[in-house]
Amino acid sequence: MIKAASTLTAVALAAALLTGCSGSSGDSGKNNDDGPVTLTYWDFMDPSQNNPRAAALKQNLENFHKENPNITVQLSTVSFGDMISRLPQAAAAGQTPDVVKMFAPVVPQIAAAQVYQPLPEEAKQITDWLRPVDKLADKDGKQVAVPYDYRTCTLYYNDKILKQIGAAVPTTWDQIAEVAGKAAKAGFTGFGTGFSGVDNSAIISTFFDCFMSEVGQPISNQDGKASFNTEKGKEFADFLVKLKKAGGMPPSVVGDQYSTVADGLQNGTVAMSALGTERLLTLQKANPDIKSATLPKTSNGSDTGSTFGWTLGIGAGSKHAKAAWKFIQYMTSPKAGALMATGGEVPTRSSTFQEPYFTTPAAKTVLDVSNFVKDHSEPHIYPDNWIAIAGGLANAGQQLYLNNSSADDFMKSAQDAANK
């Protein structure tokens, strides 16, 4: 349904995490974007990896340099967790990378840490974004980032495992807990999620984000305080408790993270999980038994999750903002977006879907994913303390599993941690 620095041509790619950061490698004292320029770019993805998304990124970087031979992009592969901790420090030292890739829910928090500089006026000339961009702004309302991809949560399931245990694809979260228990008894991880704090608890916070959208519960109030500890919000914790009681959580859940669960799906050890739609093509290529479906319905009958994704912005310390904006323009252009779509990521501009690729059979999966994101998710505003919320959820989840804390305790603990 739905879905060490090495050289690539002349594009320098630092595949290992740099121990230090620089505003513009080798030419930070210059401010001439017409001559040879080296841009530093932080991305969580390593383009040397063997998967469709990495291959698409690698090709886009090569193509950009061919069209802009005076601009070399030095990519540093930096984990999401390290980005969050290091970017504010780099901004304080005036050493942010020229181009920053950042998870959309965290843009307000990163903007508050003065990591970005406002985008140039030309950014306003791009008017075909498929979702609003007005929230990708600093406290003064100036746009600091543009969308790089769109995604939402989807239910992934291993069709072979479900058939083995005689279970139909669950359509409610109560059914998920029941089927997960049966899968666990057959020797599998019933439902993959994780309470790890690594990479800022991305897996539990993403799942929570989509679940709150389903039940219609705002995560924060107008003052930016976490405010999800309500009867509607508690349905999320109720599900986790039911899942644990059914045996659908493995002991490893306290340390599992996004990549752990994705690997489990790929390797055929995880029966079901709720992850981002961007993983569909990669997972199905690695394991044809992996299928996807709409999110199970919550008690109000909703299966509509949240729209999120990654963004690109210009670092506050960049001495080459003109070249950085040229790179961002290219990476979000129809041409680059169509290539990115070959890796399963959903482009963010309507004009991208006019590219020839989208008339080919190969585009069916990403078109299905794009339609899924459009039909089954909605964007919303994120608070400045998203990382604190994510950490609170992970800690509360660990207590739920290890100490049998209640759903009420989970919600209170997570919200209190976010509002400290």
Image (tube, rainbow, N blue to C red):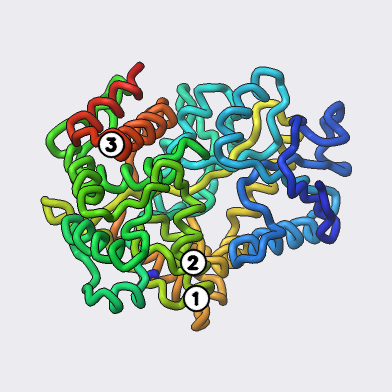
What kind of residue is marked 3? Leu
Q: Could you say which is closer to the camera, residue 64 or residue 390? A: 390
Which residue is denoted by mark 3 in the rendering?
400
Sequence-wise first label, 1 or 3: 1
Around disc 2, counting alpha carbons within 10 Å, would you say few (fewer than 14), some (14 to 19), or many (20 or more)? many
Can I make out residue 122 in this image?
no
Which residue is denoted by mark 2 in the rendering?
266
What kind of residue is marked 1? Ala
Q: Helix, strand or loop at disc 2?
A: helix
On the image, the x and y values in percent for residue 82 come to 60, 34
Disc 1 versus disc 3: distance between alpha carbons?
A: 42 Å
Does residue 418 lie above or below 268 as drawn?
above
Sequence-wise first label, 1 or 2: 2
Q: Could you say which is closer to the camera, residue 285 or residue 330? A: 285
**Residue lying at 45% horizontally and 39% vertically, measured from the top left:** 196
Lateral position of residue 112 relative to residue 172, left or right? right
What kind of residue is marked 2? Gln
Q: Helix, strand or loop at disc 3?
A: helix
On the image, the x and y values in percent for residue 332 come to 58, 54
User: Farthest bottom residue?
Assistant: 361
Around disc 3, counting alpha carbons within 10 Å, would you say few (fewer than 14), some (14 to 19), or many (20 or more)? many
Q: Could you say which is closer to the camera, residue 228 or residue 326? A: 228
The image quadrant where one finds the N terminus is: bottom left
Instruction: Please tell me how many numbered marks the rendered image carries.
Output: 3
Q: Helix, strand or loop at disc 1?
A: helix
**Residue lying at 49% horizontally and 67% vertically, measured from the top left:** 267
Which residue is denoted by mark 1 in the rendering?
363
